[in-house]
Image (spheres, grey):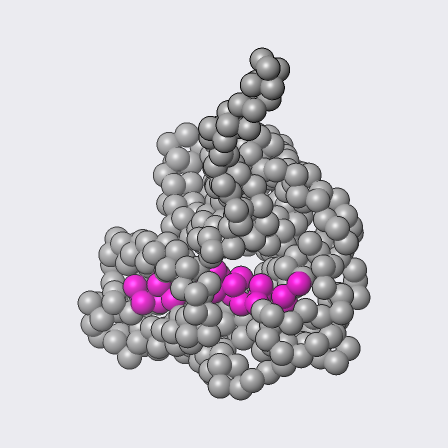
Amino acid sequence: MVKNSRTATAPARSKTRKPRKSREGWPHAPARAWLAVASIALGSFILVTTELLPIALLTPISRDLDVSEGVAGFMVAIPAILAAITALVLTIASGRTDRRTLLIGFSLLLLASDLLGMLAPNFVVMLVARGLLGVALGGFWSLAAALAPRLVHEKFVGHATSLVLGGISVATVLAVPAGSFIGSIAGWREVFGITSILAAVVVISQFVFVPKLPVAVATSIRTLPMLLRRPRVLVLFFSVTFVITGQFAAYTYVDPYLVGTVGIDVGLASALLLGYGIAGIVGNFIGGVQAERRLKPTLIVVFGLGGASIIATQLLVGSPIGTAIALVGWGLAFGAIPASMQAWTFNAAHGYPEAGSALLVTIIQSSIAIGSALGGAWVDASGTSAAIWFGAGLVVVAFLAVVFLARTKLPAGSAAGGAAGSAVTSEPALTGATQ
């Protein structure tokens, strides 16, 4: 009887146990997922900071390493060129390697670049350090944003992507002024020493918080031409090429335009550009969330605002207040564009987030170099206003392409690529190539 009594009461005890906290819809525990996202966001901040530091430290580095400032400019060009090349190469070559391993590996390359830059005895070694950074940039950016959907609940993908890409906006605002200030007090090698410490924090945090991210099927080289046969992908990359080329044709020369053409003193020009940067941070988070909810309207608004704001800087040339308002609008738009473009890439390249991101990185990095060069040609030929008008025209072309996309029902994929229809709901024949 005693045995039977115990047996009878056993189920009653099991009913009193507290149920485990549900994480339905989360691929990983929520707390760890957000810490992993934060570690990737910190990595994006340090990567872009390191990329931009030579702009702030060009004069002391060129003096200490005994090269001209023109030659020292290769410290900026080489990472961009290598990133454009390696984004595609590494995505294909990485095969089925766990994405956590790759992410930490790219962060280790960032750390090595900062350490080597800090210790560089000559300019050749410095260029080697910048080359390592270029490889890290290409690999990291082809991978990082595509990890957000694998870490968080699907309804928070926009927030997570904005957080990762927010590192770009924050670094764009802080890197140059902070690097210049610290460099003037302590020296340029000490600046690279600080970024080395921060890069080490990135490596440790990613090692601790980022979970294993295995890949079922490797990205094939066949995936890239297949994606480029999708009409939506073609419109995406056409628009990205024009908007980024236009942005860097114009924005690269906005400081001399404000000082030389508008007649604003250097201090006020710096304050206006700081306002542009802060607006960019705000735009990044607004754009990421809104693009996740309403992609096409968000794209139309940010591309339209970007083109209109650049044009406004020319039409309001006699009004410092009007110029300031135009710069804030410009900053909001181009702060929102990276996160919007990434959401657009997830949508258009559905089923292949890493391959889509790799193509996006290649196009962005190439467009940055082309835009800066074309803007420089316009400046030499006709002045800074001509370069900004040229950039505005390219952004308007990108805006018209987005409007075309919004008003036209393009198939999600080509006949070779798989089923047509919604890019979100239809999967091509090779679905699962990256995840």
Q: Quadrant of the C terminus?
A: bottom right
Q: Is residue 195 magenta?
A: no
Q: Position of residue 322 (x, y in %)?
A: 22, 71
**Viewer-proximal residue among 241 and 257:** 241
Q: Residue at x 47, y 28 (%)?
A: 16
The answer to whether residue 429 is visible is yes
Q: Residue at x 39, y 56 (%)?
A: 285
Q: How many numbered dots are placed on residues in this image?
A: 0
| In the image, residue 343 above or below residue 20 | below
**Viewer-proximal residue among 406 and 134:** 406
Range of the magenta residues? 327-351
Q: Position of residue 6 (x, y in %)?
A: 57, 18
Question: Is 253 left, or right, of 133 in this rendering?
Answer: left
Q: Position of residue 309 (x, y in %)?
A: 34, 73
Q: Residue at x 62, y 78 (%)?
A: 421
**Viewer-proximal residue among 179 and 358:** 358
Q: Residue furthest front?
A: 1
Q: Is residue 341 magenta?
A: yes
**Viewer-proximal residue among 415 and 191:** 415
Question: Is 425 left, or right, of 407 in this rendering?
Answer: right
| In the image, residue 34 above or below residue 283 | above
Q: Residue at x 67, y 79 (%)?
A: 420
Q: Quadrant of the N terminus?
A: top right
Q: Main secondary structure of the magenta part?
A: helix
The quadrant in which residue 336 appears is: bottom left
Q: Position of residue 201 (x, y in %)?
A: 52, 31
The quadrant in which residue 345 appears is: bottom right
The answer to whether residue 124 is visible is no
